[in-house]
Structures are given as structure tokens and as C-alpha cells.
Image (spheres, rainbow, N blue to C red):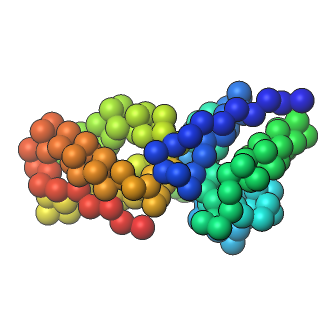
């Protein structure tokens, strides 16, 4: 049987589950509801557990958000069991359809610097807490980012975004004036 470990996150409504094996080979995936989890068998399995409100897949972890009325003491073992059963059955985490003709956009130098800092200095730290910060755009000095996983609804996410992410980006990329979170 697969032993799934858990870790607390800064967000009391979210736990980080560690199955001891890769979860996502590339990128991350965030599901705020079962309706968004089409093509994600593990997310659908977890949303089938009463009290699961959100699911986020990182490279080697799964962050699960719970409904406010549910206690982690009741929910944690059921979620861990569901994750273990899923991996033991050899089922895929996500089924990604190929996108024909999908091409990466050409980034200008400033956007390239922002993305590099996000990927090398910020996202790895945020992933340690069970979340992710995803680049969504840059316009007139404003970097737009999306918070995912344990970062959603976390009491310290605003401080992390402003004092951590914004300060780093402004220091390293002079064209950055501020950072804003978008959904």
C-alpha cells in the first residue's frame, strides 16, 4: 500500500498530501470545483469525498482545500486513503488532450525576466507550502498573477504577494511597478 504523508500549509483550510511519487510531470493543475476537473480522474475522486472544496496538483504533492464546516481530523485520513488507492490502481492523475498547433507566445525581454524570476525564485518556495503563483500578464508596469492551491484564501497570501513577490520583482525588474492577484 502507498503511504501518503501530510503537511500543514500556512492556510488552515488546506493540507498538502505527499504520495512519495511524481504527481505532475510538467506544470501544475488547479481545480476549484468538480465541474472544472473534467479529464482529471484523481481530482474527481477527491471531489467525491464530502467536504473537499478544492484540489491542486504540484510536481510531487497534492493540496486539498476543505469546506469550512469540516474538521481535518475527519477528512485527512479519507483524502489520504483516496490518494493512495488512486496511485495503487495505477490510474492517471490527469488526462491531457493534445492541443494541435499550440505555440508558445514570444515574450519580450521584461516578461521573460519576470517569468524567469517566478519560475526560479518564487514558485519553488510557494510550492513548499502547497501552492503556486502563475503568471497571467504584464501591462503598464503591473504584473498580474494567479494564486493557486494552498495560496487561495490563505491569510498570509496578500503579505507574501506584496512584501515578497512584489518587492523581489520591483528590485530585479525596474519596469515592474506593482503586482496584483487575479482569479
Residue at the (79%, 60%) spot, across then down: 49
Q: Nearer the viewer, residue 2 or 39?
A: 2
Please provide percent x and percent y for residue 127.
48, 38
> Which quadrant of the structure image shows residue 60?
top right
Q: Nearer the viewer, residue 119 or 31?
A: 31
Residue at the (82%, 39%) spot, across then down: 84
Q: In what quadrant of the picture does the N terminus appear?
A: top right
Judge from the rendering whether residue 180 lies leftward or rightward of residue 129; answer left or right: left
Judge from the rendering whether residue 108 lies leftward or rightward of residue 61; answer left or right: left
Q: In what quadrant of the picture does the C terminus appear?
A: bottom left
Judge from the rendering whether residue 80 lies leftward or rightward of residue 172; answer left or right: right
Residue at the (44%, 55%) spot, across then down: 154
Q: Is residue 75 visible?
A: yes
Quick check: 138 above or below 87?
Answer: below
Quick check: 169 above or below 67?
Answer: above
Residue at the (74%, 53%) spot, across then down: 75
Amino acid at each position: 500500500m502507498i503511504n501518503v504523508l501530510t503537511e500543514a500549509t500556512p492556510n488552515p483550510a488546506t493540507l498538502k498530501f505527499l504520495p512519495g511519487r511524481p504527481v505532475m510531470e510538467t506544470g501544475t493543475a488547479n481545480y476549484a470545483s468538480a465541474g472544472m476537473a473534467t479529464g482529471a480522474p484523481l481530482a474527481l475522486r477527491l471531489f467525491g469525498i464530502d467536504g473537499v472544496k478544492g484540489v491542486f496538483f504540484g510536481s510531487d504533492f497534492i493540496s486539498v482545500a476543505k469546506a469550512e464546516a469540516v474538521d481535518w481530523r475527519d477528512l485527512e485520513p479519507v483524502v489520504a486513503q483516496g490518494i493512495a488507492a488512486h496511485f495503487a490502481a495505477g490510474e492517471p492523475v490527469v488526462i491531457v488532450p493534445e492541443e494541435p498547433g499550440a505555440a508558445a507566445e514570444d515574450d519580450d525581454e521584461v516578461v521573460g525576466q519576470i517569468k524567469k524570476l517566478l519560475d526560479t525564485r518564487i514558485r519553488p518556495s510557494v510550492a513548499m507550502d502547497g501552492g503556486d503563483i502563475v503568471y497571467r500578464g504584464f501591462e503598464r508596469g503591473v504584473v498580474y498573477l494567479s494564486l493557486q492551491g494552498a495560496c487561495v484564501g490563505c491569510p498570509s497570501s496578500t503579505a507574501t504577494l506584496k512584501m515578497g513577490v512584489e518587492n523581489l520583482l520591483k528590485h530585479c525588474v525596474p519596469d515592474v511597478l506593482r503586482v496584483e492577484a487575479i482569479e
